[in-house]
Amino acid sequence: MDTSVVYKIIAKQMGIDESELTEATTFEDIEADSLDVFQIIMEIEEEFDMEFDSDEADNLKTLGDLLGYLKNVLEK
């Protein structure tokens, strides 16, 4: 999985530069509200042709959490 694709999706959605994003970045750090996170997840699902488990998605706090989740799902 190419993490830069995920960072591009998030940066575009939030109107920020990709260079501001790290695995330690929280959704709170980038001022993403629940609608922003939902839209980010929808774009990622479309990009990678997968679906998030809604319970798991609620537990994602950092971009590292998100990337780890994607890695686990996509490698199955």
Image (tube, grey):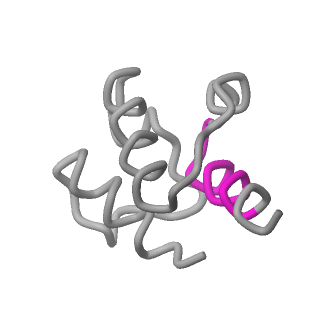
Residue pictured at 40% horizontal, 64% vertical: 7
Lateral position of residue 15 relative to residue 71, left or right: left
Total count of labels: 0
Q: Main secondary structure of the magenta part?
A: helix
Lateral position of residue 31 relative to residue 59, left or right: left
> In the depicted view, which residue is nearer to us: 31 or 45?
45
Examine the structure image and report whether residue 57 is included in the region drawn in magenta: no
Residue pictured at 66% horizontal, 57% vertical: 70
Q: Which corner quadrant holds the C terminus?
A: bottom right
Residue pictured at 36% horizontal, 23% vertical: 33
The part of the chain drawn in magenta is 61-71
Residue 41 in the image: x percent, y percent? 45, 41
Dividing the picture into quadrants, the one containing residue 35 is: top left
Examine the structure image and report whether residue 62 is included in the region drawn in magenta: yes
In the figure, 46 relative to 21: above or below?
above
Residue pictured at 53% horizontal, 78% vertical: 2
Residue 72 in the image: x percent, y percent? 79, 59
Q: Which corner quadrant holds the N terminus?
A: bottom right
